[in-house]
Image (spheres, helix red, strand yellow):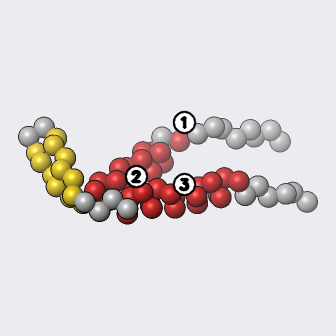
């Protein structure tokens, strides 16, 4: 019988909770200047947008993940 490894899911859950706690503890407004545009939103929205962009970018580029050894 194989023993299940729960390390990765536990680390992922802890990091997610920590990131979300950081995001939602910053409630003031922040202004972003990009080229000639100016955006003002709550800081938590900026952090959440960057977090979601990281998730999307990470899923678009799977070759950065370690490959599983398929010997069989």
Quick one: 50 or 56, which is closer to the camera?
50
Quick one: 4 or 38, which is closer to the camera?
38
For image coordinates 37% across by 63% down, the residue present is 24
Q: Position of residue 54 (x, y in %)?
A: 42, 47
Q: Is residue 62 left or right of residue 52?
A: right
Q: Quadrant of the N terminus?
A: bottom right
Query: Could you tell me how far apart the alpha carbons at marks 3 and 1 are, in whole angstroms?
Result: 19 Å
Q: Which mark is residue 15?
A: 3
Q: Which mark is residue 41?
A: none
* Corner quadrant of residue 7: bottom right
Query: Could you tell me how far apart the alpha carbons at marks 3 and 2 are, in whole angstroms?
Result: 12 Å
Q: Secondary structure at mark 2?
A: helix
Q: Earlier in the sequence, mark 3 or mark 1?
A: 3
Q: Earlier in the sequence, mark 2 or mark 1?
A: 2
* Corner quadrant of residue 22: bottom left
Q: Earlier in the sequence, mark 3 or mark 2?
A: 3
- For the residue carrying disc 3, how many other residues have a C-alpha within 10 Å: few (<14), some (14-19), or many (20+)? few
Q: Are marks 2 and 1 in contact (CB under 8 Å)?
A: no
* Corner quadrant of residue 42: bottom left
Q: Is residue 45 left or right of residue 36?
A: right
Determine which residue is flagged by label 2: 51
Q: Position of residue 68 (x, y in %)?
A: 70, 41
For image coordinates 66% across by 38% down, the residue present is 67
- For the residue carrying disc 2, how many other residues have a C-alpha within 10 Å: few (<14), some (14-19), or many (20+)? some
Figure check: 22 above or below 34? below
Q: Position of residue 2 (x, y in %)?
A: 87, 57
Give the mark toward the camera: 2 or 1.
2
Determine which residue is flagged by label 1: 64
Q: Secondary structure at mark 3?
A: helix
For image coordinates 76% across by 55% down, the residue present is 5
């Amino acid at each position: 019988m194989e023993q299940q490894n729960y390390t990765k899911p536990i680390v992922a859950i802890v990091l997610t909770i920590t990131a979300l706690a950081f995001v939602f503890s910053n409630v003031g407004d922040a202004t972003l200047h990009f080229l000639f545009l100016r955006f003002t939103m709550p800081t938590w929205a900026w952090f959440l947008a960057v977090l979601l962009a990281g998730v999307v970018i990470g899923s678009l580029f799977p070759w950065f993940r370690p490959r599983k050894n398929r010997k069989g």
